[in-house]
Image (cartoon, rainbow, N blue to C red):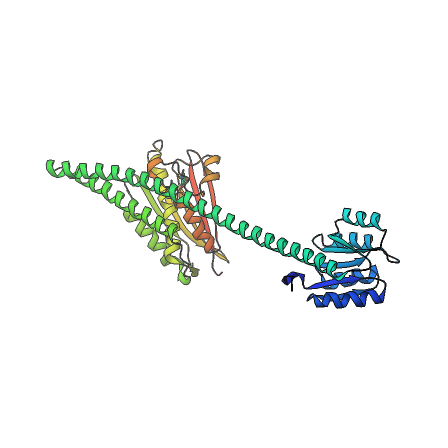
Amino acid sequence: MMIPSGKTAESILLVDDEEDIRDVLQLALSDLGLTVHQAENGDQAMALFKQYHPPLVLTDIKMPVMDGIELLQRVKHENPDTEVIMITGHGDMDLAIKSLKHEATDFITKPINVDALEISIKRARDRILVRDKLRQYTENLEILLKEKTELQDRLASLGLMISSMAHGVKGLLTGLDAGAYLLDTGVRQKDDTRISEGWQTVKGGIGKIRNLIQDILFYSKKRDVKMSMIPVAVFAHEIASEFRKKMNLEKCRFVFESGEDLGRFQADSEYLQTALVNILDNAADACAKDSVKAAHTIRFRASRDRKSVIFTIRDDGIGMDTETQRRIFTLFFSSKGPQGTGLGLFIAKSIVAQHGGVIDVKSSPGQGSRFRIRIPVNR
Ligand SMILES: Nc1ncnc2c1ncn2[C@@H]1O[C@H](COP(=O)(O)OP(=O)(O)OP(=O)(O)O)[C@@H](O)[C@H]1O
Ligand SMILES: [Mg+2]
């Protein structure tokens, strides 16, 4: 058979008020492999159209009640992609042209020549096939475009990360060099103060590199959170003592306060620890940067209410203006030059979100900042 059987063009709505003509056409159309729905007037046709959504309609142009043109308009209104072939009588040229204006696919004249009908149907089915293909291509193209944009975004942020990481490591190396120099000269001159100062600097540098690497690892391969019920007090205490160990206590006081009966909460302790340490590190940086106040204090507090556990980290460091506050959770936002990657709070926020929690920030320039992390006890 000359007609390709497109999946979408399997059924046709045949509309004619004369039963004899319908019967003849029914035979011809069935021979073309089409399922035929017959209607004897426009109303019946519209009902069938709404029920079966045929991609093809073959309709007489002159019918009582609703003529073919009106039916054509209604069908096109319902689904503009429908291919509608009009059957016209001899001398109905005006109507035929009118129907073309209303986007009929084609018209064939009575008495119907089966070959002409076949050709007309084939053309209509081909159009349906082409339209389907086009739709598929467009959809694929949209998917491809989306993937491309995502890939570009990822590449761009990867490039940004590598460069800011290189900057970060460079800055940290300068710090390590300074520490090593102090150690060297201290040992040579047998100067204990120098040795201890150099050693503190080196230790600080090592800690910072460790944090940086942990952040990058976290960023590059996000694993799923591993939740378990953990005792809040133990968790907070561990973070506090780890943080205290790496702090330079001469320059900044660290106060840990733990409320009573903190109970347990659902958390991925390794992840949540990373989040809190990132916020504590920022507090330490903010204090170190502030040369106005003589002494500084960082307060870390664990408490709870009925539904959540609350960690509060307060510092009296340099604080932030509103513009900085607006941007702190953005990936790679950092005001620390080569000393900062801008990953810390981005990661902290995503970890807290994975726990169903929120971070609330209050800060004023020159006064200090307060970060409050609220984690629901049970997800
Ligand atoms: N406690 C704070 N006091 C003042 N500014 C802060 C404080 N915490 C965060 N910020 C501001 O938010 C910015 C982003 O912090 P974030 O931890 O994401 O990056 P970073 O500390 O600069 O670098 P990284 O943590 O990746 O080493 C900081 O550069 C700083 O400007
Ligand atoms: Mg940070």
Residue 359 makes an appearance in the image:
no
Q: Which image quadrant for residue 232? A: bottom left
**Front residue of this view, candidates 129 and 378:** 129
Among all residues in the image, which is located at the extreme right?
A: 64
Q: Which image quadrant for residue 8? A: bottom right
Write the residue at 23% across / 42% down.
202
- On the image, the x and y values in percent for residue 214 come to 33, 50
152, above or below 320, in the image: below
Residue 325 makes an appearance in the image:
yes
Q: Is residue 26 left or right of residue 148?
A: right
Q: Which image quadrant for residue 124? A: bottom right
**Front residue of this view, candidates 153 and 166:** 153
Q: Is residue 109 left or right of residue 165?
A: right
**Front residue of this view, candidates 59 and 244:** 59
- On the image, the x and y values in percent for residue 17 come to 85, 62
Q: Quadrant of the N terminus?
A: bottom right
- On the image, the x and y values in percent for residue 203 come to 24, 44
Write the residue at 19% across / 41% down.
196
- On the image, the x and y values in percent for residue 290 come to 35, 34
194, above or below 223, in the image: above
Q: How many discs mark residues in the rendered view?
A: 0
127, above or below 324, in the image: below
Write the residue at 81% across / 47% down.
98
Q: Where in the image, quadrant-wise, is ligand 1 located?
A: top left
Among all residues in the image, which is located at the extreme top?
A: 292
